[in-house]
Image (tube, rainbow, N blue to C red):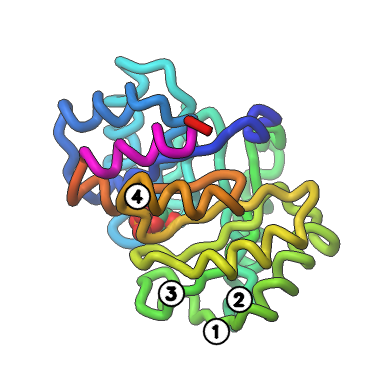
Amino acid sequence: MNMMREWKHIFKLDPAKEISDQHLDLICNSGTDAIMIGGTDNVTLDGVRELLMRIKSKHALICILEVSTMEAVIPGFDAYYIPMVLNSQEKSWMMDIQHQGIKEYIDLLDYTELIFEGYCILNEEAKAFKYTNSQLPDIEDVRAYAYMAEHVFHLPVFYVEYSGKYGDPEVVKKAKEQLDHTLLFYGGGIENGQHAKEMKEHADVIIVGNHLYKNIDEALETVEAVKVK
Ligand code: 1GP
């Protein structure tokens, strides 16, 4: 997945949410670098399989599964991204769930397709924040987590996650200053081209999710906004 170094933009689709064929085509033809499938609630095997088939049957686009439950992992994705929640107060979200998954599939795993993401969740209202019993970090904490993602854990991705809320660009900037090799992903509340541009100033890749289901035209604008200099 070295091509990830060239990426600027990802659309994240929630398999538990409805999306029309017409909107799915617009998303896939938008020029985004990849589609990530993932969610927190009601992620099922059937939901994931159906969405993957709908995309892959018509589009030659990179599809990533962001694994939130081992119950909904299927073959056929180009890559599997595994979150490790750095600011969870429970070791299980950082280490134990991943350990169990690897233990079960260790002889089947193709490590070229597995990407571990160091997540830092910054929106207290987000389901993922509550679900993982995370602790709200301040800007100095975020800097330290970014440092650890790169220098302690050597993770390929540090994910600044504001899911559902537009974040503080200063936090993203400070995190980025700690990273030379680890890529910075930013996701949360991006609703238009201007948001996308602002966060892309500091992030290597921006991720747009929710707004696809609210205002598809504005969400699509975010691709153009980060691709044009
Ligand atoms: C969620 O970071 C992504 O995991 C994108 O956030 O849904 O708020 O765009 P939004």
Kindly identify which numbered label has been placed on residue 21. none
Q: Are marks 1 and 2 in contact (CB under 8 Å)?
A: yes
- Mark pair 4, 2: CA separation: 22 Å
State the image coordinates of residue 181 (x, y, percent, origin top left).
79, 47
Along the polypeptide, which appears first: circle 3 or circle 1? 3
Q: Earlier in the sequence, mark 1 or mark 4?
A: 1
Q: Which residue is mark 2?
A: 87
> Image quadrant of ligand 1?
bottom left
The spot of residue 60 in percent (x, y) is 42, 16
Identity, as a three-letter code, of the amino acid under mark 4: Gly
Which residue was labeled with disc 1? 135
Cα distance between the residues tagged 3 and 2: 12 Å
CB within 8 Å, label 3 to label 4: no
Q: Secondary structure at mark 1?
A: loop
Neighbours of disc 2 within 10 Å: few (<14), some (14-19), many (20+): many
Q: Which residue is mark 3?
A: 123
Give whichever of discs 3 and 4 has the lower sequence position: 3
Which stretch is magenta?
217-227
The type of residue carrying mark 3 is: Asn
Instruction: Name the amino acid, label 2.
Output: Asn
